[in-house]
Amino acid sequence: MLTKRIIACLDVHAGRVVKGVQFVDLVDAGDPATQAARHAREGADEIVLLDITATHEGRRTLLDTVQRTARELFVPFCVGGGIRSAHDAEQVFEAGADKVSINSAALADPSLISAIGASFGAQAVVVAIDARRDPNAADPVRDAQVYVQGGRRPIGRTVVEWAREAEQRGAGEILLTSMDSDGTRAGFDCELTAAVSEAVGIPVIASGGAGTVAHFADVFARGKADAALAASIFHFGVSTSRSLKEELARAGVPVRLPC
Amino acid sequence: MRVTVIDYKAGNLTSVLKTLKHLGAETVVTDGDLSLVESAERIVLPGVGHFAATERLDATGLTGAIRSAIARGIPFLGICVGMQWLYSGSTEAPEQLGLGHFPESCTRFAENTEKVPHVGWNSLEVRPGSKLLAGVEPGEFVYFTHSYKGPVTNDTAAITQYIEPFAAAVERANVMGVQFHPEKSGDTGLKILRNFLAWQAEVA
């Protein structure tokens, strides 16, 4: 049986893992390669590394980090942040990533999705969408808006429509982050996740708001997510993927166990 | 132990090469140098992406060289599209022929309520006698990402269920294929690749 994936997310800044609430107040949380290996050992089904403050000068640092992290990692490994061209993506793949996550660059030039997919396969292209509900809309969920610049600026497109376009252009997966929930540990936005998951035929990874095991069970059931991403719940010894998955299994969620 | 890895410009080889090296193999990559296939001790054909990309194997003469190597008994492992290429073809690119080592064709998952592609960790039901999958316990998980798959036949070494039962692995003597990605399947995947690297013909 196909299992629900638990994806450990490492937000990286200048070669270090960091964690903040809603992208501010960053706290150092360790070395990416060490953290990634630990998550894999502790049962994570996949590792995502997001360079959250990607700059031109930081590219070499990121590629070094990706290479070091990939060396001893034998689970799927996705890298995002600052990938603006097919050439950027190629460098990240050559450093050892299996997938790239693209966000604002895909919005600026949607043909980037098919350009990367043509060389590396659709499975290698994850389109990340930062979303906020639109409280002024008749349907705040269906009309949730796509945001850029770390959730600060709406781009004027609905999340559902952009997810559909990304799929048509050859995206392999959607990584959906609720900016309303991110960092709150108050639960995923299940309604928004379900709206996107039902609108596309490709897997949707839910992100933002994980705080308890029940939140994960909820986003797999109500949110119809195929995978869920978490950063804060795993850091500072709060929990491990394995213990999370053992509890999910008891709640009837199909997960990869033993792992 | 030297492994010749075939590069047909479909996806990146980094993960496969890294994992084979981790397991102690020396790797050489060829995208058309047939002598590297003729002298190969073992051959791995990776591949993600579209079945049409295998056209490059024909254009470079690699298809014929691989066919000869297989006939000489060289152990061969196809991964993902590399496994699908062992069949006659795929409905993904009907005009492109596969190797035809296995006579059937690959087909797309039937449309139903489940998502296609099949992405994620799914379990293996290993058939008795598989050397490639020796030591893989019932229900061990491996990582898949694909929309097309081979049918269950007498050559199937492991079955996985998604929408319908399909061939997660195929094996006949020295010719082996896996639909999943052993290089991305944790300890189970490493065990399977170790089995491939240790594969020896039965001595009569």
Image: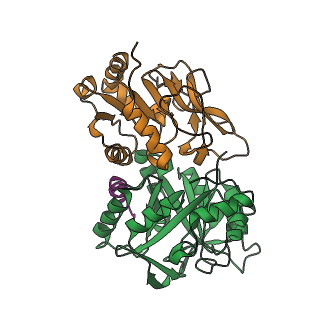
Chain colours: A green, B orange
In the image, B92: left or right of A57? right
Q: Residue furthest top?
A: B204
Image quarter in which the C terminus of chain B is found: top left
* Residue A115, x across and y down, in percent: 42, 51
Residue range corresponding to the magenta coloring: A80-96
Q: Is residue A81 inside the magenta stretch?
A: yes
* Residue A20, x across and y down, in percent: 50, 82
* Residue B40, x across and y down, in percent: 28, 27
* Residue B116, x across and y down, in percent: 63, 44
Residue at x 34% of width, y 67% of height:
A62
User: Height in image: B52 above or below A78?
Assistant: above
Residue at x 28% of width, y 73% of height:
A57
| Res. A242 visible in picture | yes
Residue at x 31% of width, y 68% of height:
A59
Image quarter in which the N terminus of chain B is found: top left
Between A63 and B26, the one nearer to me in the picture:
B26
| Res. A102 visible in picture | no
Number of marks drawn: 0
Quarter of image, res A43: bottom right
User: Height in image: B18 above or below A160?
Assistant: above
Quarter of image, res A7: bottom right
Q: Is residue A152 inside the magenta stretch?
A: no
User: Height in image: A148 above or below B91?
Assistant: below
